[in-house]
Image: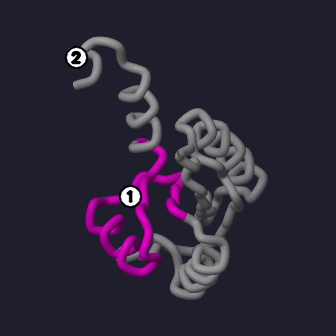
Amino acid sequence: MDILPEKAVLIGVAVNDQSLPQIEDNLNELELLTETAGAVPVRKFIQKLETLNSRTFIGKGKLEEIHDFIRNKSIDLAIFDDELSPSQIRNIEKELEIRVIDRTNLILDIFASRAKTAYAKT
């Protein structure tokens, strides 16, 4: 029996002076990292905000849009391009009802999966 790879959505936020092309470039890089980790990127979401939502990082409407997509496409994982706090991860997971990680955790997962020695794995 084959194990299917996780399907992921990628989420980037442009705040104030960040340009949309810059966020798109970051998400393209995140897409490559996602594939390296063994997941399949299905769609990218970008939101432009004046200020970040301290509870869920992104706005309520965008969160609902992502949740609807996740339900309709059987998505397993949401990956944020920006670093999230542990409470933001918990809040977003509660809203989206799937596992949520950020770029930093994705990179750490890649390194851990490629580590050969017990020392390197820690």
As drawn, 84 above or below 74: above
For label 1, the crowd category at 10 Å Cα-Cα, with few meaning under 14, some 14 to 19 and many 20 or more, is many
For label 2, the crowd category at 10 Å Cα-Cα, with few meaning under 14, some 14 to 19 and many 20 or more, is few
Q: Position of residue 8 (x, y in %)?
A: 59, 57
The residue drawn where x is 42% and y is 52% is: 83
Q: Position of residue 34 (x, y in %)?
A: 58, 43
Q: Relative to the observer, which residue lies in front, 14 or 102? A: 102
**What are the residue bounds of the magenta stretch?**
76-104
Dot 1 corresponds to which residue? 84
Under mark 1, the amino acid is Leu
Under mark 2, the amino acid is Ala
The residue drawn where x is 42% and y is 76% is: 97
Left or right: 32 as drawn, with respect to 51: right
The residue drawn where x is 66% and y is 52% is: 41
Q: Is residue 41 magenta?
A: no
Q: Relative to the observer, which residue lies in front, 41 or 6? A: 6
Element type at marker 1? loop
Q: Quadrant of the C terminus?
A: top left
The circle on residue 74 is none
Element type at marker 2? helix
Q: Position of residue 76 (x, y in %)?
A: 51, 62
Q: Which of the colour schemes (rainbow, by chain, secondary structure, one colour) is used? A: one colour
Left or right: 28 as drawn, with respect to 6: right
As drawn, 55 above or below 13: below
Left or right: 100 as drawn, with respect to 67: left
Dot 2 corresponds to which residue? 118
Q: Mark 1 or mark 2, which has the lower sequence index?
A: 1
